[in-house]
Amino acid sequence: MRLKQLHIKGFKSFAYDTVIHFNEDVIGIVGPNGSGKSNIVDAIRWVLGEQKSKELRLEQMADVIFNGTKNRKEAPSATVELIFDNDRGLLPTEYQTVNISRTLYRSGDSEYRLNDVVCRLKDIKSLLVDTGIGSNSYAIISLGMVDDLLYDKDDSRRYMFEQAAGVSKYKSRKKETLQKLNSTTADLDRVSDLLFEIEGNMKTLEKQAKRTRKYFELKDEYKTLAVQNAVRSMQNLKERYKKAGQDITEKQDAYSAINTEVIAKEAKLEAEKKQNLEQELNVGQQQKELNELVAKLRNLENDKNLLNQKISFKKQSLTNADAVLTESKVS
Ligand code: ATP
């Protein structure tokens, strides 16, 4: 496995897109003070997942992004990419070339990529775990670390030898395994607690299950009885329907007979009415004739009375004339 290329863009003093090729024998990078040599080491450390800004000689992590000069404006993001040749298959992946990159944006968003696919830092660390390469490994030695080794600060020499001997990876695995063991023990404790709780709930649940079973039995029974009841009601209704049909037929027959009788009687009544009307007309006529006869009779009676009066008057005149005549004879 070999580091082939380092690609830096917008990281610290590397405003321009910079590619450093390691495919030929490179034994050093030279330059005046402050020209950015240490920034290259920082870039490698950063892309491998360095989280402490102090280790990168910065106040805060956002300072890794090129912050501009008089002639050039600040960069929107910092990106560092390492390209490894994996022709010997040391890295546990089928790829011949492995690209690892890290980008930090001014918004605070960041991403790691493995062969251009977004991934977690954990994925990068687990890929490199057997190689001894890491952000804090002695494969990358910064200026300050030389001092630390010379003064054996924080047991740093032992740490470096362990890394060189390949012990540290087992140590870190041991640490990880112990952490997993602790978390598994905690999980087991939690499982025991849950089991205790579950046992307590079991009796209640059994009672509930028993009640539920009884409920379903009763429900089935209810269903059967309801169906039987419905069948019986249906039969009853059918019989009543049939009987009602017969009653209606009988009543319709009786109604037809009565209706025929009523029609005959109405016809007879109509004929009698007609006859009465004719008789009434006849009586009226006779009454009229009678009234005329009565009026004639009254006239005749009046004439008769008048004649009688005339006769009495004539008789009186005759009597008077006789008297006068008699008197004149006497005288
Ligand atoms: P020395 O030999 O003094 O250690 P060096 O060549 O190693 O120097 P570095 O320490 O790598 O140089 O680079 C320091 C330079 O990087 C400084 O000029 C500093 O202004 C510049 N620098 C650091 N961070 C940024 C940034 N975010 N944006 C622009 N320039 C930066």
Image (cartoon, rainbow, N blue to C red):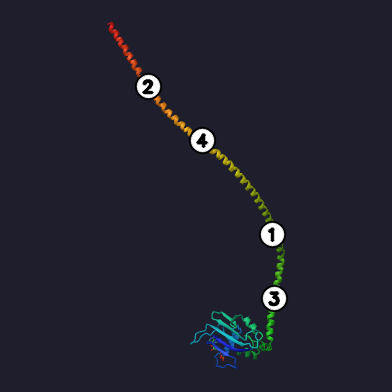
| Residue 244 appears left or right of 263 | right
Q: Quadrant of residue 133?
A: bottom right
Image quadrant, ligand 1 = bottom right
Residue identifier under label 2: 300
Residue identifier under label 1: 216
Residue 267: mark in rendering: none
Residue identifier under label 4: 269
Q: Nearer the viewer, residue 34 or 111?
A: 111
Depth check, mark 2 against mark 1: the one in front is: 2
Q: Residue at x 35, y 18 (%)?
A: 307
Q: Secondary structure at mark 4?
A: helix
Q: Residue at x 69, y 59 (%)?
A: 216
Looking at the picture, which amino acid does disc 2 mark?
Answer: Leu
Residue identifier under label 3: 184
The image position of residue 8, as x and y in percent, is: 56, 87
Quadrant holding the N terminus: bottom right
Looking at the picture, which amino acid does disc 1 mark?
Answer: Phe
Q: Residue at x 57, y 39 (%)?
A: 258
The image position of residue 327, as x and y in percent, is: 29, 8
The image position of residue 199, as x and y in percent, is: 72, 67
User: Sequence order check: which comes first, mark 4 or mark 1?
Assistant: 1
Proximity of marks 2 and 4: CB atoms separated by less than 8 Å: no
Q: Secondary structure at mark 2?
A: helix
